[in-house]
Image (spheres, grey):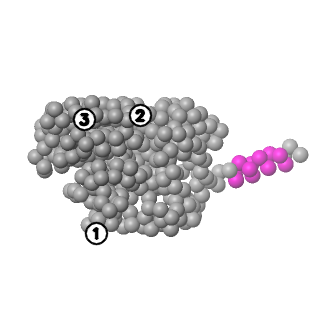
């Protein structure tokens, strides 16, 4: 009898090892939910594509998903469950909030489990020496600032405003501007606001008085729409108003109405794949994802779907090389070079855990209900 139970246990254990376990935490409810829907859809599509082709090394990917509800404590509870109960090989997705991802990585680092964040702040992956198990499928803020500095140099703009919210996302960008601006000969006037603010007139009037030549706004909240509308009302509509990649969402542009007409957005190339030159290596994959996403979900994907789609395929590459050995999976992530994703070309290394660079960034505009390419390097 005991021998029978032992054989049964061995069989069950063997069956359990026929999959790679990947866990994800995103916010499908609460303030960050407007990002979560497309981010989850991007993951689902990538996972289904991979599993339909036989999975990885002959094993399907078994997916464990939890809604953090835009609450860091719930995100941490989900992370603990993924690590201790579900026993995942890796985690992809940090609650679509940079602050939550930073909190989560404290747990994944301690557990020695690879974590691919799909959130924005470069503080998620720096310093690398303190975050050896953490990676990111989004571009770093310093690269975004360098790309904007290139644009300002092209337009002979020397004095800019940085209007950032008080979140980790906004303040990480401020920190990087303070490093990039002096080296690029830019004078920056800093103003901040809370993500829930509904009146930006005091800050905008200060910027108008300061004589800035362009305004850079950094938020993923509806307060960014308020800033767009009030800037135009206060007579700042003639200077460039530039939003971050976190604001590339059709819903925000439609809410802004006429105020969105002259707004620029710094972004990965995904939202304007059709406008890219045929020589761009990202274009074929972008067009394919657009087609497949629309066929399944009956809507166009946004760049948030793209960054989670890329993250799952980065995970696939790492699992293919690392298998069941978490250290080998981590090392495989570090070794990814010249991977053409839908967000750009990824190049990781042992000292750099963000794969994208400023060459993967463009400036967009919003015309006739869609994003169009405005500036391409």
Q: Is residue 118 above or below residue 164?
A: below
SS assignment for the magenta stretch, majority: helix
Label 3 environment density (alpha carbons within 10 Å; few <14, some 14–19, many ≥20): many
- Taking the image as shown, residue 254 lies to the left or right of residue 361, namely right
Q: Earlier in the sequence, mark 3 or mark 1?
A: 3
- Taking the image as shown, residue 262 lies to the left or right of residue 219, namely left
Residue 96 coordinates in the image, percent (x, y): 46, 42
Label 2 element class: loop
Residue matched to label 3: 204
In the image, which is nearer the foreground, mark 3 or mark 1? 3
In the image, which is nearer the foreground, mark 2 or mark 1? 2
Residue 313 coordinates in the image, percent (x, y): 46, 55
Q: Which mark is residue 278?
A: 1
Q: Foreground residue, 343 or 87?
A: 343
Label 2 environment density (alpha carbons within 10 Å; few <14, some 14–19, many ≥20): few
Magenta part of the chain: 4-15
Residue visible at 30% across and 60% down in the picture: 367
Q: Earlier in the sequence, mark 3 or mark 2?
A: 2
Q: Residue furthest front?
A: 233
């Amino acid at each position: 009898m005991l021998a029978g139970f032992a054989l049964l246990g061995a069989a069950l254990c063997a069956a359990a090892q026929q999959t790679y376990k990947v866990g994800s935490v995103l916010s499908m409810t609460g303030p960050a939910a407007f990002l979560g829907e497309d981010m989850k859809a991007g993951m689902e599509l990538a996972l289904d594509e991979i599993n339909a082709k036989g999975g990885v090394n002959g094993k399907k990917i078994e997916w464990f998903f939890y809604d953090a509800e835009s609450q860091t404590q719930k995100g941490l509870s989900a992370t603990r469950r993924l690590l201790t109960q579900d026993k995942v090989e890796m985690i992809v997705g940090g609650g679509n909030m940079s602050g939550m991802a930073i909190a989560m990585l404290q747990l994944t680092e301690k557990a020695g489990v690879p974590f691919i964040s799909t959130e924005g702040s470069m503080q998620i992956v720096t310093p690398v020496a303190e975050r050896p198990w953490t990676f990111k499928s989004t571009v770093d803020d310093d690269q975004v600032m360098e790309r904007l500095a290139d644009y300002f140099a092209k337009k002979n703009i020397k004095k800019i405003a940085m209007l950032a919210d008080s979140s980790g996302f906004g303040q990480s960008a401020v920190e990087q501007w303070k490093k990039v601006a002096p080296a690029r000969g830019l004078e920056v006037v800093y103003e901040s606001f809370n993500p829930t603010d509904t009146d930006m007139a005091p800050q905008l009037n200060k910027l108008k008085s300061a004589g800035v030549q362009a305004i850079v706004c950094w938020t993923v909240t509806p307060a960014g729409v308020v800033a767009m509308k009030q800037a135009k009302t206060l007579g700042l509509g003639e200077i460039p108003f530039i939003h971050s990649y976190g604001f590339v969402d059709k819903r925000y542009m439609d809410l802004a109405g006429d105020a969105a007409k002259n707004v620029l957005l710094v972004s990965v190339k995904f939202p304007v794949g059709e406008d890219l030159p045929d020589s761009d290596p990202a274009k074929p994959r972008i067009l394919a994802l657009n087609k497949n996403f629309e066929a399944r979900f009956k809507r166009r994907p946004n760049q948030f779907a793209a960054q989670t789609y890329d993250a799952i395929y980065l995970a696939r590459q790492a699992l293919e090389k690392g298998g069941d050995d978490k250290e080998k999976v981590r090392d495989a992530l570090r070794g990814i070079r010249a991977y053409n994703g839908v967000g750009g070309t990824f190049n990781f290394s042992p000292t750099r855990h963000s794969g994208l660079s400023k060459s993967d960034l463009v400036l967009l505009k919003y015309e006739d209900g869609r994003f169009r390419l405005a500036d391409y390097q």
